[in-house]
Image (spheres, rainbow, N blue to C red):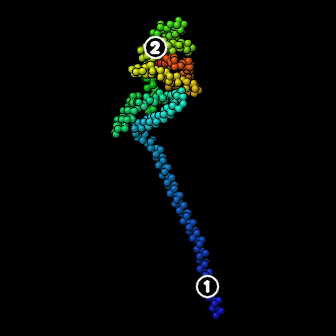
């Protein structure tokens, strides 16, 4: 009996030991298998990621080079696209700055708080919007853009603004407009000469006669001589309130303003005050040395000088003379600033070249 019990116990322990050995051997094998599966999954994931990166990179390169491809195949179409896309972006940027300037003008000390660039935008943007409004309105009608945009591209001076012009077009159109204004210099100078005899003060008449003689002989009077005669522009015969009809018409023309529109004196006063505020802003922002080349060219053209083929030093020197005269000007004798294109630029070499070449 005892023997049978011992045998049964040994058999049970042997069976248990036999079952446990295979289990202890299979556990490491299962772990190795799981590790192998994880490694394969990582390799597959890495291959998929690399494939995605490859195709995504190819797609990005295709998008980047797509514009170049279109430009090679359709150069004229891409030129039109670039002109209108870049121009529209510039118009939008200037329009935002224009709105900011209007808000600034209302919050602070009126227009006297604006910068030179903001004053320039206040002058140019309303005119540009009037010029572009028909184009934008007509292009909104279905199928009209196939006619309007090519037409605007063929007549950019009349249908587009400077935002859409090339550098050569900007120069050509500026010279064209400037030449039209210069044609009125001589008639205005004759009007100024005709008023010499009406000056009652003998001393003042002699000073003004010398100034007129300088202009007639092909030179310009000094800024001191011009300032010494500034009293003539705050009363008869050259103040805005006493100008004759023909004199006022020629004065409007040399500033590129319409002579047939009403409120001529008011418009001349507004133009004079605009120039005066710009001059104050230039001085406030560091003088002519702080101005860029493009800003100098626009300033000279706006004040009656052809800036083509002028060096930076020449442009700065002339504008410094203008600012000297402007410093002695106020609203009462604002007519002096309006006549300064004759007093300071009538015999300028670049103007004569533009007129007679």
> Quick one: label 1, few (<14), some, or many (20+) residues within 10 Å?
few
Q: Would you place residue 309 above or below residue 211 in this image?
A: below
Q: Position of residue 108 (x, y in %)?
A: 54, 30
Q: Residue 99, can we see it?
A: yes
Disc number at residue 54?
A: none
Instruction: Give the residue pinned by disc 1.
Output: 12
Q: Residue furthest bottom?
A: 1
Q: Which residue lies at the image location 44% right of the left edge and 36% below the top edge?
A: 88
* Quadrant (top left/top right/bottom left/bottom right) for the N terminus: bottom right
Q: CA distance from mark 1 to mark 2?
A: 134 Å
- N-terminal of the pair, mark 1 or mark 2, is 1
279 and 100: which one is in front? 100
Q: Which residue lies at the image location 49% right of the left edge and 54% below the top edge?
A: 52
> Quick one: label 2, few (<14), some, or many (20+) residues within 10 Å?
some
Disc number at residue 242?
A: 2
Q: Would you place residue 200 above or below residue 51 in this image?
A: above
Q: Which residue lies at the image location 50% right of the left edge and 24% below the top edge?
A: 274
SS assignment at label 2:
loop
Q: Would you place residue 352 above or below residue 293 in this image?
A: above
47 and 104: which one is in front? 104
Q: Residue 307, can we see it?
A: no
SS assignment at label 1:
helix
165 and 336: which one is in front? 336
Q: Which residue lies at the image location 48% right of the left edge and 46% below the top edge?
A: 61
For the image, the number of numbered tags is 2
């Amino acid at each position: 009996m005892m023997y049978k019990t011992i045998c049964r116990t040994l058999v049970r322990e042997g069976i248990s030991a036999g079952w446990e050995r295979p289990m202890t051997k299979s556990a490491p094998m299962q772990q190795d298998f799981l590790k192998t599966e994880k490694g394969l999954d990582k390799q597959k994931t890495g291959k998929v990621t690399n494939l995605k990166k490859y195709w995504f990179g190819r797609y990005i390169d295709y998008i980047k080079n797509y514009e170049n491809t279109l430009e090679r195949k359709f150069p004229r179409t891409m030129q039109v696209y670039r002109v209108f896309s870049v121009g529209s972006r510039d118009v939008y940027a200037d329009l935002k700055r224009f709105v900011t300037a209007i808000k600034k003008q209302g919050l602070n000390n009126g227009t006297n708080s604006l910068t030179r660039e903001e004053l320039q935008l206040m002058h140019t943007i309303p005119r540009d919007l009037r010029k572009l409004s028909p184009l934008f309105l007509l292009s909104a009608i279905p199928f009209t853009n196939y006619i309007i945009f090519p037409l605007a591209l063929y007549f950019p001076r009349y249908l587009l603004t400077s935002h859409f012009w090339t550098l050569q077009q900007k120069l050509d159109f500026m010279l064209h407009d400037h030449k039209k204004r210069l044609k009125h210099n001589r008639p205005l100078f004759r009007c100024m000469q005709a008023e010499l005899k009406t000056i009652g003060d003998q001393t003042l008449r002699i000073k003004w006669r010398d100034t007129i003689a300088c202009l007639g002989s092909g030179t310009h009077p000094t800024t001191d001589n011009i300032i010494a005669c500034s009293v003539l522009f705050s009363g008869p015969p050259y103040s805005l309130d006493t100008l004759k009809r023909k004199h006022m018409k020629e004065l409007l023309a040399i500033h590129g303003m319409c002579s047939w529109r009403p409120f001529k004196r008011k418009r001349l006063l507004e133009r004079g005050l605009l120039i005066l505020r710009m001059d104050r802003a230039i001085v406030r922002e560091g003088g002519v040395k702080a101005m860029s080349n493009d800003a100098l060219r626009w300033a000279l053209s706006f004040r009656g000088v052809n800036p083509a083929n002028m060096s930076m030093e020449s442009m700065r020197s002339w504008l410094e003379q203008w600012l000297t005269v402007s410093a002695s000007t106020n609203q009462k004798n604002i007519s002096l600033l309006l006549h300064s294109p004759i007093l300071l630029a009538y015999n300028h070499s670049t103007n004569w070249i533009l007129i007679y070449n």
